[in-house]
Image: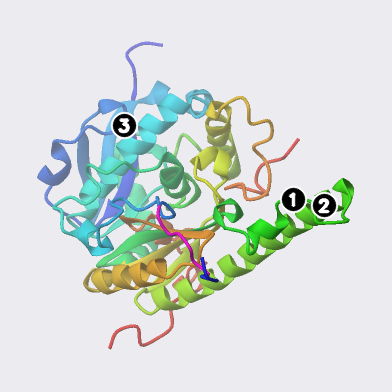
Amino acid sequence: MSAPQEASYVYAVARPFAAEAVAGLAGVGGYPVHLVAHEGLAAVVSAVPLHEFDEEALRANLEDLGWLEEVARAHHTVVDAAARHTDVVPLRLATVYHGDERVRSVLAEGRASFERALGRVAGCVEFGVKVYADPATRTPAGAEKSSGARPGESPGMAYLRKRREQRDRRDDTWRTAAELCDRLDASLAEWARARERHRPQDASLSGESGENVLNAAYLVADGDTGAFLDAAQRVRDSAPEGTRIEVSGPWAPYSFAGVEALEGTAPEASEATEAPEGGRP
Amino acid sequence: MSGSEFPEYEGSFTGFPEESASLSRMLDEDHPLANRDISLVDLLDRVLAKGVVISGDLTVAIADVDLVRISLHALVSSVNENVPSPWEHGHPLAGWVRSD
C-alpha cells in the first residue's frame, strides 16, 4: 500500500445550502465537512481515509463501541447542523463512496427518489416518544393485606398468593400501558404528518427502568411542534402510576427518510403510516 | 391513603430533559440538540436501523442486517457482564439477531 487513498463518507442528502454552515464542523474521525452539489441536491460529505471504512475495517470497527459511538455522534452532529439550515434526508451510518465524483453520480441516479424523500420531510422535524411500563413502581392495591400470611394460611399458600398478586399487578400494568399508548398516539397523531415505530429498547442497553413498550417517532411540521409537545405534555401529566412517557428531539427526520422510496416505489408504500387528515385546524 | 389511585407521583417521571420544564421549552434554545445528552441507543435506533439505506461503494458486501448486527455486538458486550442474556424479548433488534 502506498499513500492512503481517500473515500467520501456521506452523511445526508439535502437541498443546497451555504457550505459555511457545516464548514467548521468536525465530522467522522474529526475530518472536515464539505458539500457535493448536483442540480438542486447537495450531499454532505467528509473525505476519509479509505482504509478506515472499507469492509474489513468496518467489520472490526463496528464491534468497537468506542469507535461506533464516536462515529454515530459525529454523524449526528453533521446531520443535525445541516438540518438546521435546510431539508435533509439522513443516510445511514457509514455510507461511503470512492470519491466525490461517485457521490455526484449517486445524486444523479437517485435524483427522483431523493426528491420524493425530501418532499416528504420538507419543513418537518422528528420527535421520539417512548412509553415504559414499570410494575415495580406501582403500589399494589391493598398492599397491607398481602404482606404476611393470613390467618389459617400456610406459608406455601401465602407464597402462591403473593406470586399471583404480583402477576396480576404486572398484567394490569401492561394493560394500563397499552391503553396509554393508544391515548398518546391518538393525541400526537393529530399534530403529526406521519409516525414510525422503532423496536422497543432493551432495558439492559438503554439503562432505563421498566419495560419499553412503545418506541415511536413522529414527523411534525415546524409550525406544529409547540402543539405536538403540549399534547405530549398533557398525556404525560395524566399518565397512570406504573407508566412513564419520554420524549426526545427535535431530531432530523431520520426515521422518515424511507428506504422503500429509494428503491423506486411510490412514497405511499413507505412503512410510515400517514397521520389522519385534518391535523391542522 | 383513602383509596387514592395515584398516591405518589414524585420521582415517577425521570426521563424528561428538564423535569419541571414544559416540553415546549426545548425549542426555545438556539440549537436544541447541540448540548443535550443524547442517548446512544436512541441515536443508534436512527443512524443504523433507520436512515436511508443506499448502497455505498465500500459497504456493498456487508448486508444491512450484518451492519446492524455487528454494531449491536459492540453495544451488548459493553453492557455490564452481569447481564447474562441481553437477547430477551423487547430487544431493539429482536428477530434480527439470533439468540444462541
User: Which dot marks residue B18?
Assistant: none
**N-terminal label among 3 and 2:** 3
Q: Is residue B73 above or below residue A261?
A: above
Q: Residue furthest top?
A: A2
Query: Cβ–Cβ below 8 Å for labels 1 and 2?
Result: yes
Q: Which of these two is toward me, A15 or A224?
A: A224
The span picked out in magenta is: B5-10
Q: Is residue A106 left or right of residue A184?
A: left
Query: Cβ–Cβ below 8 Å for labels 1 and 3?
Result: no
Q: Position of residue A228 (x, y in %)?
A: 31, 71
Q: Which of these two is toward me, B83 or B41?
A: B83
Q: Which of these two is toward me, A108 or A30?
A: A30
Hey, which quadrant is residue A108 in on the image?
A: bottom left
Amino acid residing under circle 1: Gly
Tag in front: 1 or 3:
1
Q: Is residue A138 among the parts visible in the rendering?
A: yes
Question: Mark 3 highlights which residue?
Answer: A28
In the picture, the quarter occupied by the C terminus of chain B is: top right
User: Which dot marks residue A158?
Assistant: 2
Q: Is residue A41 above or below residue A239?
A: above
Tag in front: 1 or 2:
1
Check the residue under mark 2 and report the chain it is in.
A
User: Which dot marks residue A148?
Assistant: 1
